[in-house]
Amino acid sequence: MRRNSCLLVFIASLALFLALAVVLWMGFQRPAVQTVTLADGSRLVLEAVTSGTVEHVHGSPWQRVLYTLLPPNQKELSGSRVFSGAPGKVTFWVTRPGSGAAPIQIHAAPFDEHGCMGPTVTPQGLGNDLERYELTAYPRRGQVLGLRFFQRAGDQWKPLGQVQVPNPSPGPHPTWPAQPLPQTQRAGEVEATLQKLTAGVKQEEIEQHQEPGQMLCMAHLTVRVGGKPSGAWSPSIAELSEASGNTWHNSSTTYLGEAGNLRLFFTSLPWPDDPVWKVRVQLTRTPTARFTPEELWIVKDIPIPAPGKVLPLGRKSTVQGVAMELVEVLGANTPPPASLDFAELQKHPQIIIHAPPSLPRDVHRMPIRAIDERGRDVPVQFTSGAGNDKGNTDMFRLETSPDARRVTLFYAVQKVRYVEFIAPRALREPRQK
């Protein structure tokens, strides 16, 4: 009996000793508070940085010990503050007390120990002065992960300050073997060759609106069909990714050159610790290419309303499994719906086409041709678009002659193709001496 009592006393003493050790350890683990003071007098206070769903528990040593010991349904009784992010993301948790009724609008960019920066993000307000900055692309292999704050005014970015911590998820991460350029990949009868990747290029023909740390990159691509350069296919940079897990979805590609031999310009933010890129190129047929009847929606005899008038049509069709509706036609100089982004008054008639909210990623929609009642070609230009959970709406300008009364529209729904290249990341062009 005495031996059992001694054993119980020993176990209780050991438990008390471990609890005290945990208290002391957790007390010394609290990092120094980092703050950034803004122009309006408010402060950004870095509360925590989380990787994935790993919890960070803040509070007094006793509160954190209680949080550890209490069962899941009672942990809130500890009085601790708990920060936990989303899978695959690093989250900076920031409080911003005293920001006032109209706080400064902030953008923030991640950076590494080399000073390279990633895409900017904006905060998500969570109430009680708490904001979070979620990063999906950041220097995963770096030793340091920081967040640099900016205030944007037009195309200018004013630096406001920064915070930094040791990289919360340094790996190890997988690697990809670099394959030298040029590389050729096929998608059916189409043959695409990535000849060269260059970063930091200067191109006067390209209007550049770059975020902090961004650089203009160029991919030299040739497209052939049957061994000959082809202008029937239009390439664009769909996605860049790295083996460590970073992915950038490119929303805009500008290209210069002649049919089948193009220079594609896009902005990117490469991390130097990831030396290999996977470049995913999207190939779509141009309006001059051939389309099958199953790929076409031919909308005949579209009336052209008088200037300032709106004509509802509601013509519907399903092509390649995509249900579409030509909603209405706007006469020349008719104010567009406020729901369309960047819509402007046009001196030509416009049509509005609606499509479902969830479109397959491999489907591309576009008008390829229009003719009036006299058989004259009518140029068609995209002017505005918007998408939400109710659908995708696009507006196109019909550059009709003044005497045109009706138009027939040829609208294509095509399956796009993709090719992928694993190549050394774009390197800066050498400076001219």
Image (cartoon, grey):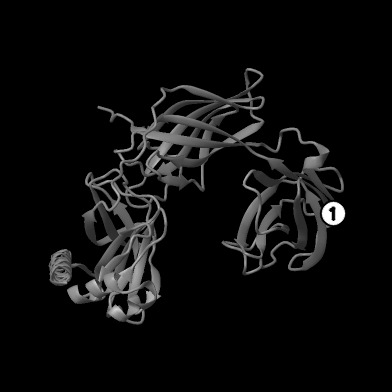
Q: Is residue 315 above or below residue 414?
A: below
Q: Nearer the viewer, residue 71 or 98?
A: 71
- The quarter of the picture where residue 160 lies is bottom left
* Residue occupying image coordinates x 78% and y 54%: 402
Q: x%, y% of residue 362? A: 64, 43
At which x and y percent is residue 14? 14, 66
* Kind of residue indicated by mark 1: Arg
Left or right, 400 with respect to 150, comes to: right
Residue plotted at (76% across, 49% down): 321
For the C terminus, give its image quadrant. Answer: top left
> Farthest residue toward the top?
227
Disc tally is 1
* Residue 3 visible in the displayed image: yes
The answer to which of 286 and 359 lies nearer the viewer is 359
What residue is pinned by disc 1?
406
Residue 103 appears in the rendering: no
State the residue in front, 343 or 426. 426
Left or right: residue 75 versus residue 164 is right
Residue 86 at x, y percent in the picture: 41, 60
Residue 200 figure quarter? top left
Task: Report whether 414 appears left or right of 81.
Answer: right
Q: Is residue 430 above or below residue 391?
A: above
For this view, does 191 lie left or right of residue 277?
A: right
The residue drawn where x is 37% and y is 72% is 72
Which secondary structure lies at badge 1? strand
Q: Residues within 10 Å of mark 1 (few under 14, many from 20)?
A: some
**Which x, y percent locates residue 46?**
25, 67
Quadrant where the image shows the N terminus: bottom left
